[in-house]
Amino acid sequence: LIEKSEFKEGMRRLAASVCIVTTELDGQKIGCTATAVCSLSDTPPSLMVCLNQASLTGKAVSKSKKLCINICSTEDEATSNLFAKSSNDLDKFQNNDWETTQSGSPRLRSSIAAFDCIVDNIAIAGSHFAITSLIQDISISPDKNEALLYAGGSYGKFSSL
Ligand SMILES: Cc1cc2nc3c(=O)[nH]c(=O)nc-3n(C[C@H](O)[C@H](O)[C@H](O)COP(=O)(O)O)c2cc1C
């Protein structure tokens, strides 16, 4: 196996869309920033997200069995930084405009798209939960479509060649 530092150096070159993964458990809103999100299939519509087993969000999703994947817009950089902090002693949900999806997870109104999901399967993969989810509902912003990207330790946005 390669060294952890080599893994990190390589993965810094994998530009990714920044998402805020949220859930609700026992009346509490919980969420974190995540880039390990990918499309799984359109039959049935499903996606996958990998969350650290030690994170509050990972623990909460494994219990609540529901989540919302909010794709950040270029205006959500501060929200991404806030949600990358641990939820201990911090109410991450007080600053932004949130609404509740049909399944009960918080949806970020400023996101460019949001997927309301229920968990289909959770595989334990080393330090992380590999969570596959079925998409129940989608909300697509009519006016915003610029995704917030993360690569090389910095935020950016997409521009075509
Ligand atoms: C750009 C970025 C991407 C991240 N992607 C992930 C990810 O895909 N999965 C994950 O478990 N943590 C990811 N994190 C780290 C979590 O956001 C961080 O550990 C957070 O404090 C967890 O909060 P919680 O314990 O309140 O759930 C990422 C952080 C940043 C800044």
Image: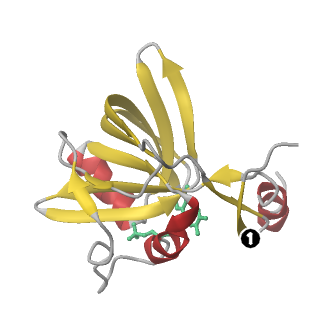
The extreme right residue here reads 161
Residue at 51%, 52% in the rendered image: 128
* Amino acid on which the number 1 mark rests in the picture: Gly
Q: In the displayed image of the protein, which residue is found farthest to the front?
A: 143
Residue 82 x, y percent position in the rendering: 45, 77
Where does the image place residue 2, in percent across and percent down from the top left? 84, 55
Residue 114, image x, y percentages: 39, 44
Q: Quadrant of residue 113?
A: top left
Q: Residue at x 81, y 68 (%)?
A: 5
Q: Quadrant of the C terminus?
A: top right
- Residue extending farthest to the top is 43
Which one is nearer the viewer's eye here, 4 or 46? 46
Horizontal side of residue 86 vs 67, given as left or right: right
In screen coordinates, is 136 left or right of 13?
left
Q: Residue furthest left?
A: 27
Q: Quadrant of residue 7?
A: bottom right
At mark 1, the secondary structure is loop
Q: How many marks?
A: 1
Task: Locate residue 108, reporting x and y percent.
Answer: 35, 57
- Image vertical order of residue 41 relative to residue 15, above or below: above
Crowd rating for badge 1 (residues with CA inside 10 Å; few <14, some 14–19, many 20+): few
Q: Label 1: which residue?
A: 153
Name the image colouring. Answer: secondary structure
**Ligand 1 closer than 8 Å to the CB at disc 1?**
no
| Residue at (29, 66) in percent of width and height | 97
